[in-house]
Image (tube, rainbow, N blue to C red):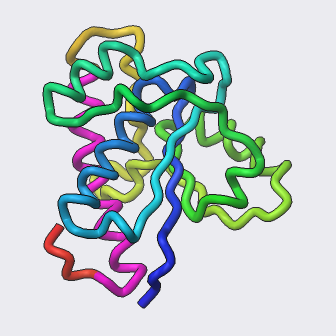
Amino acid sequence: MTTEPTRVLFVCLGNICRSPTVEQVFRDQAEKAGWAAQFVADSAGTGGFHAGEPPDRRAIRHARERGYDISGLRARQVGPADFERFDLILAMDALVLEGLQRIQKFSRGNRAELTLFLDFLPERKGQDVPDPYQGGPEGFEHVLDLAEQGSTALLRELLKRKGMFGCGC
């Protein structure tokens, strides 16, 4: 049984919609299941154009309506050092995954497993979490649906890897 926290980084393009939403949903699910100490969660974007900014106001509003507070999170850009710090880096879509693979080449101590976030849901393996930025409210709701489903599956898989399955999550 592994007791070191598993470090997970969620990555989208700008780090203001999808990845901060998934970060907080995952944290909240881990906490509610009693496993928060087993995980460190963070989020970042492949682009740095929103660095230091809070999540998109629409993402904040929709998350709050479901009981998640993402308002305190701030965007940052992913870098080569993240591949040394994190055990698992999860891309929100295939384009972000390609960008991460390019950044990964510059990492010195590449320990991170890199994959799509939805790969932990068998019925959604290989699928993207669609970017809601240019759309309406339904896009943000869909991201929350996927964040909840994907986080539950991810939490189960990571607890199984740690030899802790049977968590009631």
Dominant SS in magenta = helix
Task: Indicate the quadrant containing the C terminus: top left, top right, bottom left or bottom right.
Answer: bottom left
What residue is at 24 percent from the left and 18 percent from the top? 61
> As rendered, which of 121 and 5 lies closer to the eye?
5
What residue is at 29 percent from the left and 69 percent from the top? 35
Picture mark count: 0
Figure check: 54 above or below 90: above
Q: Is residue 56 left or right of residue 95?
A: left
Percent coordinates x, y for residue 148 in the rendering = 23, 46
What residue is at 56 percent from the left and 53 percent from the top? 89
Q: Is residue 11 left or right of residue 125?
A: right
Tell me the quarter of the picture where residue 153 sits: bottom left
Percent coordinates x, y for residue 122 in the rendering = 31, 59
**Part of the protein shown in magenta:** 140-164
In the rendered image, the residue lying farthest to the bottom is 1
Q: Tell whether position 161 is magenta.
A: yes
Figure check: 109 above or below 105: below
Percent coordinates x, y for residue 63 in the rendering = 24, 29
Tell me the quarter of the picture where residue 119 sits: bottom left
In the rendered image, the residue lying farthest to the front is 72
